[in-house]
Image (cartoon, rainbow, N blue to C red):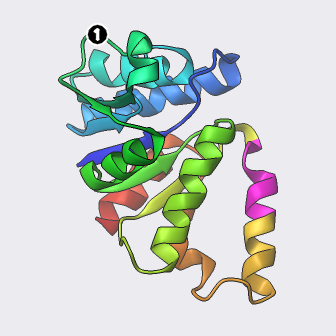
Amino acid sequence: MNICVFLSAADLDERYTRPAREFGELLGKGGHTLVWGGSDTGLMKVVADGVRGSGGKLVGISVEILRELARPDTDELVIAKDLAARKALLLARADAIVVLAGGLGTLDEATEVLELRKHGLHDKPVVLLNTAGFYDGLITQLRRMDEEGFLPVPLGDLVHVADDGAGVLAYLERAV
């Protein structure tokens, strides 16, 4: 399975790096391909190290302005013309999307795929990996949107939430 992972390129502490590394190892051991932003920094590097170290493949999709941060040992590196094209390529290459801890770019990517899913413009499963309760606030907001009628489809049809990498993969293996 080609699994697109949205996550931070920042260097973070162990409560985020350990679960990211473990998730990457699970992807590699499961024979999956990581489709991600291609960066060799921060959590992006950590998850890719886990995938590579356990035998998985790496497909990086970056942009010209970030080319110098690209991981050198990808199985395939695609350079998109801009961030919008990058997001479209990431989604096109994926069988499923997993969102790990991240900043504004990650939030932008996550909300865009949820919006596309809401409108039926893609049917790929989306999972939030809620490491250390990182997405608790977002989950609360999404539930409120659902309960108060702001979402035209049930929240459970848009996104699944998992607390660990094993839960993510168990869900994806049923959903894909």
What residue appears at the point 25 percent right and 49 percent down from the top-left corner? 93
Residue under label 1, please give it: 72
Q: Which residues are magenta?
A: 133-140
Residue 94, x across and y down, in percent? 29, 51
Indicate whether residue 94 is drawn in magenta. Answer: no
Q: Is residue 128 visible?
A: no
State the image quarter where residue 16 is shown: top right
Query: In terms of depth relative to the viewer, which is nearer, 145 or 18?
Result: 145
Q: Does 94 sit above or below residue 101?
A: below
Residue 149, x across and y down, in percent? 75, 90
**Most distant residue in the front direction:** 81
Q: Is residue 16 visible?
A: yes
Crowding at label 1, few (<14), some or many (≥20) Cα neighbours within 10 Å? few
Q: Main secondary structure of the magenta part?
A: helix
The quarter in which the C terminus is drawn is bottom left
Query: In terms of depth relative to the viewer, which is nearer, 169 or 135?
Result: 135
166 to the left or right of 42: left
Residue 144, x across and y down, in percent? 81, 76
What residue appears at the point 37 percent right and 27 percent down from the top-left corner? 25
Q: Does 164 sit above or below residue 48?
A: below
What residue appears at the point 60 percent right and 84 percent down from the top-left corner? 154
81 to the left or right of 106: left
Q: Does 163 sit above or below residue 124?
A: above
9 to the left or right of 22: right
